Amino acid sequence: MEDRQLAIDVDLTNLDANAWLGEVDDLCEEHGFFEQLGSDHFAGFLEAGNKLLVTFENADRVRANNTGAEPRGFAYARHDGWSHLALFSSTESWFRDPAVYAFFDRLDDDDFFEDFEQIVFHGGNSGTAYAAAAYSVIAPGATIIALRPQATLDATTAGWDTRYKHARRDDFNDRYGYAPEMIEGAGDVFIAYDPIQRTDACHAALFRKPHVTALPCPLLGDELDRAFDRMGIHDVMIKLAMDGMLDRKRFAQLLRARRYDQTYARTLVRRLMMTGHMRLAKVICEYKLLRGPDTFFADKLAELKKFAGDQT
């Protein structure tokens, strides 16, 4: 298969759910295929080059948060000539649907993944990250990027996670079930999480294989995909993974970009104040105000000065 950049020219912004889905359907049919998987999931494939990016995404989050309201892999197909297989859900989902199982079974029977030299599975948040890890078993040797994945929502194994009660109706013990076991045949596996989010950290700790690289992201919260996008490191991370160049050191270098992220800085100031590190919080507020006016840092600085006055 020769690499070729796809001429994807479509405006997906400001479309309602049905119109957006129709445009994605048409594009995928033109360059590959599109398929409905049961009532809540669908798959689209863009055929381009020998590198394949497999993404799991929630359609509403794509429309609301992604650049140009595009599936994450469209830009790589357009600019880098990567092929792209996208799995979407119409609701919050862990992709525990027999129709999704059957789809991957069919790809396996057709030796679909053997046509590609490099494969990256990507899930940007929660259930999509779980699915990226779980379904990677179908493509041995693939690289996995999973941002705050759950290992399982089975109550016997992860009863300490009391979130996502609606998803516990799904069976996490049948096929493609326990994500930490599904990654055994993978290449490099990168598990990103915020260690301050205790439940996320517990799930991350269940991914214990030697080829797993834990990527702690303190104070970036429970929407790592959006934080990485804000910092401009998400695309770089995916490209490094595709080229086999992502590791803990390189990620740590990328993560330095958080110092320029206002959301991270505000979270850091709140955390420092909550834990009694008032002097450091004051330094950060003063530094941020030197770079430009900001109501949050001005208010916090006034609060810190009042606190200092009360201590004298």
Image: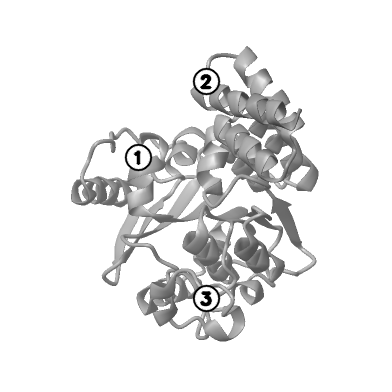
* Mark found first going from the N terminus, 3 or 1: 1
Residue 232 at least partly seen: no
The answer to the question of whether label 1 and label 2 lie on touching residues, with beta carbons closer than 8 A, is no
Residue behind mark 3: 153
Instruction: Determine whether 297 is above or below 106 in the image.
Output: above
Q: Residues within 10 Å of mark 3 (few under 14, many from 20)?
A: many
Q: Position of residue 301 (x, y in %)?
A: 62, 24
Q: Which residue is at 48% across, 75% downward?
A: 109
Q: Position of residue 119 (x, y in %)?
A: 59, 55
Could you tell me which quadrant the C terminus lies in?
Answer: top right
Query: Which of 126 and 112 lies nearest the eye of the viewer?
Result: 126
Q: CA distance from mark 1 to mark 2?
A: 29 Å
Q: Amino acid at mark 3?
A: Leu
* Of labels 2 and 3, the one closer to you: 2
Give the secondary structure at mark 1: helix
Residue behind mark 2: 294
Q: CA distance from mark 2 to mark 3?
A: 41 Å
Q: Residues within 10 Å of mark 1 (few under 14, many from 20)?
A: some
Query: Which of 264 and 137 lies nearest the eye of the viewer?
Result: 264
Circle on res. 99:
none
Q: Amino acid at mark 1?
A: Ala
Residue 242 at least partly seen: yes
Instruction: Determine whether 129 is above or below 13 in the image.
Output: below
* Of labels 3 and 1, the one closer to you: 3
Give the secondary structure at mark 2: loop
Q: Quadrant of residue 97?
A: bottom left
Residue behind mark 1: 69
